[in-house]
Amino acid sequence: GTAMLTFGSGSMSDFLLNWVEHVRRLGDAAGPYLVGALDGPVADLCKDRSIASAVAPPADGGGGGGGGGVGEHTAQLRETSGYYRYRPGTFLAMGLVKQLFIRAVLREGYDVMVSDVDVAWLRPPWPLVRYSSVRSAPAENGAVEQEASLLALADVVLSVDQVQQYLDCDKHRWHVDSELNTGVLFFRASAGALAVLDEWRAAMSEAIRQRNPNHDQFWLNEVLKPRTFLDLKAAPAGVRRSWVAE
């Protein structure tokens, strides 16, 4: 199955309500959604508006759940008022809590599309990232869009911090060498996606330990950028077959 996921604090309530409204308008084609309530005001708002939501546990539950010491950071978010980005250390703490939510959804067997609350979904994203539809299929019977035939095989799909449309093409590798953006990202319920979450969590935890001010997006880039981003479209057939089952 699939799920749409976002996170919100009280300072972003208007954006959160807009995100929920757009996802609800998509109906069954979008599948279920979930809001990760990062503080009390958002948890109360979701309850009042009948918005599907969950709160992070106040302390790590153990049992290998991937918490990585996030209990104290969950408490930090709940006790912080205002916009997290302007609070030293809080924005990175939010990254640790976000990965905990993502991990929980993946372990329930759902592929998850994660997006910031300032995103407005105008159509379901699933034909761009996976080969099966959810619930009532869209007009194309849920088939993956032809241009995304390789994208839909990936364990993790990210957006980029670029808006130059002339670079949106194979020649320029679709901005893959630019800053990777966590504002919209997709995780498949797979061992590969969980491995990325493991490394991302470890990088953020170490950054907090060292009081490094960089945010969660920076550390996901640090995890992924050392890898070689192979261009499967341009790769020789033999190389491509080693990565993709025909």
Image: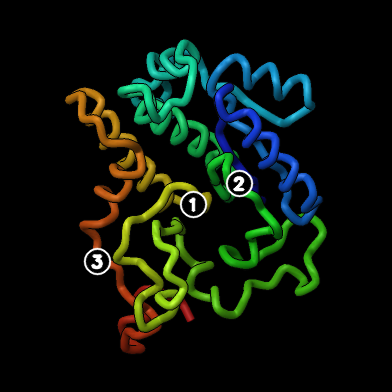
Q: Determine the CA span between mark 3 and mark 1.
A: 19 Å
As helix, strand or loop, the secondary structure at mark 2 comes to: loop
The answer to which of 18 and 42 lies nearer the viewer is: 18
Residue matched to label 1: 185
Residue type at numbered disc 3: Thr
Residue matched to label 3: 228
Q: Residue at x 74, y 20 (%)?
A: 47
120 relative position to 242: left or right? right
95 relative position to 177: left or right? right
**With respect to residue 215, does 63 lie above or below?**
above
Q: Which mark is residue 110?
A: 2
Whether residue 180 is visible to the viewer of this picture, yes or no, is yes
Q: Residue at x 79, y 64 (%)?
A: 137
Labels 2 and 1: the sequence-earlier one: 2
The answer to which of 245 and 11 lies nearer the viewer is: 11
On the image, the x and y values in percent for residue 162 come to 40, 62
On the image, the x and y values in percent for residue 51 come to 74, 30
Residue type at numbered disc 2: Tyr
Residue type at numbered disc 1: Leu
Front tag of 3 and 1:
1
On the image, the x and y values in percent for residue 240 come to 36, 81
As helix, strand or loop, the secondary structure at mark 1 comes to: strand
Labels 3 and 1: the sequence-earlier one: 1
Q: Residue lying furthest bottom in this view? A: 237
